[in-house]
Every structure is written in C-alpha cells, then in structure tokens.
C-alpha cells in the first residue's frame, strides 16, 4: 500500500507539472496552434522534444529487458534509423513544406486522388491507434501491479483514469503544447536512466572507468550479428529494415511529422530531424547498457527470487528492497513521462488526421465549428484508445516491442508503398482500386511470414516485412497505371 501511495503521489506531481506547462503554452492556442503549432516552434526545442517522442513506454520497459534474448541487436536497427532520418530530412520534409500540408496524407490526394488519400489516412489511423495502445498497455500493466492492484482497482478503471488525464492536458494546446511537454519528457527519461545506471554500477562496485569493460564482457552486450542470414537478428536485415522503418514510421507518420512541420521553415526542420536521430543513438545505447546492468544486478542480488526477465525486469528491480526509494520514484517518472507523453501526442495526431483527412474539415470552415469538431473527435479518439487497450489486456500473449514493430510493418507498409510509387513514378493510376491493393498487401505479407521458414529453407521474415509490404503495394499500383488519354475510372 505504501508503494502504491508513493507512485500515485509521483504521478500526481508529474501531471501537475504537465498541466502547468500545457496551460502556459497552449491556453491561447487556436486551431492552427493545435494542428501545426502556428509554424513557429524553435527548431532546437523540437529537437529535444523529438528525442523523447521517439521513446515510448515500450522502449523504457522492453529494450532493457530484451537484451537477454537479443543482446544489443536493436542497435543495428537504430543505426538504420539514423540513415532513414537523413532520407526523411532530404526528401520528404522539403516536399511537405512546399505543399504547405497540415496532414501529410494530403500528398496522396494531390498525387493519386481521394480514394488513395483516405486509404493512407485510414491505415495511419489503424496503425497509430493500435501502436499507441500497445505502448500504453505496457505501462498500464506496470501501474496495475504497483498501484491499482494494492488499491483493489480493476484494470479497466486504471485505463479510463490514465487516458482521461492524458485527454485533459492535450485537448487544448495540441502540437503547440506537445513541443514543451515532450521536452520535459526527454529530460525525465534521460535523468531516470542515468540515475539507475549510476546506482547499479555503484552497487556492483564498478567505477566509472571499470563500467565499459564490465558491460562489454557480459554475454548480453553483443551488438552486431553477421553469422546467420536466416536469423531475425541478422545485421543487414535489421539495418535496412531500420532505414525503411524510420521513413515509414516517422517520415510518413502524422504524429511525429506534426512536430517536425511546426518548425518555421524546412531548413530548421531538417536540422531537427537529423540531430535528434543522431542523439537517439546514444540514448538507446543507455537503455541497452542499463539492461545489461539490470541482469548483472539480478544475478548478484536477487538470485534467490528466481529468474526475472523481459518486460518485468526493470520495474521489479527498481522497486526491490535493495534499491533506494529515490530510484523507484525516478523509474516511475521516466515510465510515465514516456507513456503519457506518447499517448498525448498520438491522440493529437489521430485527432488531426481524422478531422482533416477523413472528415475533410479544414481551416476554411468557421473557426468555432472547426474547434467543436476537433474537440469532439479528440474525445472519441480517447474513448476508442481505452477500448483498444482493454482488448489488448484480454488477449496479450506477445513481447510488447515485437508487437509494436509487427503492427508497424503491416500497417505502414501500404503507406510507404504509395509514397514511394508516387514519387518514383509520375504516371496516374485508377484511384478507386488503390484501397484493394493496400488491403491485399498486408494479407499476402501475413501468408508469407507465416510460411517463410517452411517455404524458404528456414528463413525467418522479421523486420524486413515492412519492405516486402511496401514493395507488394508498389507492384500492385503498377498494375493500376492508366494511360493519360484514357478516361479515368474514378
């Protein structure tokens, strides 16, 4: 019970800070402020915000725990992320600024037509709702164990209360507030990881100079995997998949691009994209080092408590008897900073895309009508997120971080394929048939992934599924190319 009250007090303090920042930065925000931050965000603040925005509760919980099974193989994908960020900065950002887009999926309408536009928006909607719900689900499970079970509060009420808090601080300011609240999140995340690393190293009697050698010699710290091309950890699989993942899940994601496009011009936006992705390499490195230290600590101090691994590792050790209360509080601050900020930004992006892309509301409407529509959509998105999280709770049977990237591969693949085809080939297509291609591609990918080991001599399709999905979509669009002098069937 004492632990539950301490966690509740920590959450209350953090949210009080969030509400103050959100009110100061967003209480005068209009619709343009909600959707684009009035295109006045300082690029260096967006850079700081983007570092934290790319780290979810899943990263905070799952990356340290996953080093036992996969070592530091995740870093191979992170290196690909940086290359992908350069591609986004040099190719996509100038195009989005030139078109002056509020929602990036407006490109699809301009290039193909209304059906393609709505297809991209709906795939984003499904991907972001499922992805954000998986990320937030992981955190809700931790909070259920630490807080709500001791207070005899059911999981469903846990979700309702936490999503309600997110709705309250994000419904007014939108992107204009998120830039500043995400900057707070970045600070809290890095502080929590560094504090934990320092304490664990000290408890293991490792000095600052001894720490690198101790981590490097541990079996969980292997970074590069070149030995087995069939393995899901194979370097070129993860590196190339990382490039395409960041192009799709950042460059073609309304959530993260909404922050980036709030900069004053595309040069500032490019600086933000490249610098934040470069710094992220070192931040993820801290999480991986923390994972090794957590397993070293568990083997040394918690050997009598059985094997602790996976998503439960960080939280279990942070609140163990050997850790000071300060570390437990720091863990909770980092966790809620990662989770709540990510969920708040997801709700903002979902609200923007659904309002602009699917309902076709725009800034030419009366400001009062657009504001009412936006706030109603924001509430509905929050309610839907609650429902999806509860469904995940009832059927959860997979590692959280793998579930997130599997969802991204299936849902962002068609979006990536449409954008790549649109920029590489200038020929028109039969717009009305694009949704069928976009739906069939993930179905074909699922069949391929389910049977890849049997059909391809043990080869495992893992994170490269995104590339295959995009390629199938692009090939499908090739079949829909129409002659310019032929009457359009849309």
Image (tube, rainbow, N blue to C red):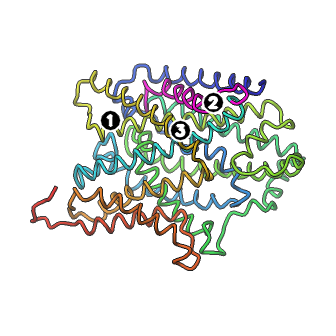
| Residue 134 on image: x %, y % | 55, 44
Whether residue 173 is visible to the viewer of this picture, yes or no, is yes
| Residue 276 on image: x %, y % | 54, 46
The range drawn in magenta is: 149-175
- Disc 2 is placed on an element classified as loop
Question: Image point 70% across, 37% down: which residue?
Answer: 192
Asked if the magenta segment contains residue 157, the reply would be: yes
Name the side, left or right, on which 61 lies relative to 135. right
Mark 3, mark 2: which one is toward the viewer?
A: 2
Task: Give the quadrant of the C terminus.
Answer: bottom left
- Disc 1 is placed on an element classified as helix
Q: Which residue is mark 2?
A: 154
Question: Image point 68% across, 59% down: which residue?
Answer: 72
Asked if the magenta segment contains residue 357, the reply would be: no
Name the side, left or right, on which 355 lies relative to 239. left
Label 1 environment density (alpha carbons within 10 Å; few <14, some 14–19, many ≥20): many
Q: Which residue is mark 1?
A: 355
Task: Give the quadrant of the N terminus.
Answer: top right
Give whichever of discs 3 and 2 has the lower sequence position.
2
Q: Is residue 123 above or below residue 453?
A: above
| Residue 190 on image: x %, y % | 66, 40
Between 193 and 163, the residue placed more toward the observer is 163
Query: What predominant SS class does the magenta segment belong to?
Result: helix
Could you say which disc has been placed on residue 342 in the image? 3
Label 3 with label 2: CB-CB less than 8 Å? no
- Disc 3 is placed on an element classified as helix
Name the side, left or right, on which 418 lies relative to 82. left
């Amino acid at each position: 019970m004492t632990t539950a009250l301490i966690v509740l007090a920590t959450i209350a303090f953090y949210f009080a800070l969030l509400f103050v920042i959100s009110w100061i930065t967003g209480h005068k925000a209009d619709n343009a402020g909600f959707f684009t931050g009035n295109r006045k965000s300082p690029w260096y603040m967006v850079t700081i915000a983007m570092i934290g925005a790319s780290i979810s509760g899943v990263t905070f919980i799952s990356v340290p725990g996953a080093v036992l099974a996969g070592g530091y193989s995740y870093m191979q994908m992170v290196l690909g992320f940086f290359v992908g960020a350069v591609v986004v900065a040099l190719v996509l950002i100038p195009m989005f600024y030139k078109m002056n887009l509020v929602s990036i999926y407006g490109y699809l309408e301009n290039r193909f037509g209304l059906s393609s536009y709505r297809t991209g928006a709906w795939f984003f909607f499904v991907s972001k709702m499922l992805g954000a719900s998986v990320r937030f689900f992981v955190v809700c499970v931790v909070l259920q164990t630490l807080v709500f079970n001791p207070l005899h509060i059911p999981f469903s009420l846990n979700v309702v209360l936490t999503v309600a808090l997110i709705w309250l601080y994000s419904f007014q300011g939108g992107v204009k507030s998120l830039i500043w609240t995400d900057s707070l999140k970045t600070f809290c995340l890095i502080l929590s990881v560094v504090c934990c690393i320092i304490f664990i190293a000290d408890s293991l009697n490792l000095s600052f100079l001894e720490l690198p050698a101790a981590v490097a010699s541990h079996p969980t710290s292997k970074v590069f995997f070149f030995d087995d091309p069939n393995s899901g950890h194979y370097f070129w699989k993860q590196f190339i998949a990382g490039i395409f993942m960041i192009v799709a899940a950042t460059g073609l994601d309304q959530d993260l691009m909404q922050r980036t496009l709030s900069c004053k011009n595309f040069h500032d936006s490019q600086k933000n994209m490249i610098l934040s992705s470069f710094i992220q390499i070192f931040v993820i490195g801290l999480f991986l080092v923390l994972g090794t230290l957590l397993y070293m600590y568990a083997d040394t101090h918690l050997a009598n408590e059985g094997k602790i691994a996976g998503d439960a590792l960080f939280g279990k050790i942070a609140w163990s008897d050997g850790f000071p209360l300060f570390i437990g509080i720091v863990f909770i601050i980092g966790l809620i900073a990662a989770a709540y900020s990510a969920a708040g930004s997801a709700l903002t992006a979902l609200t923007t895309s659904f309002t602009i892309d699917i309902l076709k509301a725009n800034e030419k409407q009366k400001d009062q009508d657009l504001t009412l529509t936006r706030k109603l959509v924001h509430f509905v998105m929050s309610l839907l997120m609650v429902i999806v999280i509860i469904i995940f709770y009832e059927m959860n049977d997979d590692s959280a971080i793998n579930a997130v990237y599997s969802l991204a591969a299936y849902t962002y693949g068609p979006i990536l394929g449409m954008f790549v085809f649109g920029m590489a080939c200038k020929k028109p297509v039969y717009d009305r048939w694009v949704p069928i291609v976009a739906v069939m591609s993930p179905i074909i990918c699922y069949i391929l992934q389910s049977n890849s080991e049997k059909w391809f001599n043990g080869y495992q399709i893992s994170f490269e599924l995104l590339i295959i999905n995009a390629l199938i979509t692009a090939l499908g669009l090739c079949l829909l190319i129409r002659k310019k002098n032929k009457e359009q069937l849309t």
